[in-house]
Amino acid sequence: MSLQLRILMNKFISYLILILVFVTTACNKPAGNIFTAHSHNDYHQQRPFYLAHEQFCASIEADIWYMDDQLFVAHDFEEINKERTLEALYFEPIASVFEQNGGRAWKDHDQRLILLIDLKTGYDSTMTALLEALEPYKHLFDPAMNQHAVKIVISGNMPDPDLFDNYPTFISFDGRMENRYTKKQLERIALFSNSIGDYVSRDFKGQLSKEDRSKLSDYIKTAHSLNKKVRFWGIPDDPAVWKQLKKMGVDLINTDTPAEYMQTMSK
């Protein structure tokens, strides 16, 4: 083989390597609209936590019941399974990905994951049990120990806002727009969540009346003026709905289908 031919071959191989690197990087690069989804009732997924995490969901929801000195993850009492504990379905997987990713939820991102815990049983005993369960994993949830810590947000049967100070500062709460919070209480509110049905006049299919748009817009502006994120539950899993709410400024789009959401919103 002549010297000129070898030079041409080497150039060709170099170009080929560059193309392969570019394609591989493009394929592995997260699509647009990452960190905009809330994985609603995440424990109903075939792969709780992991599917939502792989789809770059900003927030993951787990409903918990305190029974027999355990915190079980389930939507209804009849669904309780002794194998499906909060520790097994969420704390242990979170610990695993943090170990893999150098102390953060995603290797190449500083985004803090939200774990929204919806209390199905009374807050007093459930919160006491939750704090005990969190203790061995505190380094994963307390930003004083890790700036990339997962943000715990309590929803459901929440304590009265007057009791927020009874809980560690790394515990935040899910706000309701109809409530009136003091400035100090607002510091413990991570986001505002309400049913979409409270702000639209009919089944929401992605098309809004002028009145509905005004109500939602006022809600979003109010929350954002307080530097809080916005989430609505009760929305249909419909691309038109996702896109409409995203366009209006909703920060966390409620979905039961995280993979479909990411695929659709990335187009």
Image: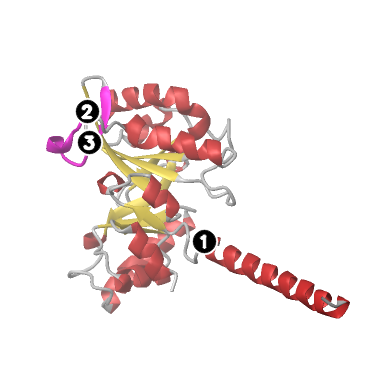
Q: Is residue 41 magenta?
A: no
Going 47% across and 34% down the picture, which residue do you hit?
A: 95
- Which residue has dot 3 on it? 120
Residue 72 in magenta stretch: yes
Q: Identify residue type, mark 1.
A: Pro
Which label sits in the foreground, 2 or 3? 2
- Give the residue at the far right of this rendering: 3
Q: Which residue is mark 2?
A: 82
Q: Nearer the viewer, residue 11 or 136?
A: 11
The front one of 180 and 203 is 203
Compare marks 2 and 3 and give the one earlier in the sequence.
Answer: 2
Amino acid, disc 3? Lys
Q: Which amino acid lies under the numbered mark 2 shown in the image of this protein? A: Lys
2 or 1: tag closer to the N-terminus: 1
Q: List x then y, in percent, for residue 246.
A: 40, 68
Q: Name the mark nearer the viewer: 3 or 1.
A: 1
Q: Is residue 44 left or right of residue 226?
A: left
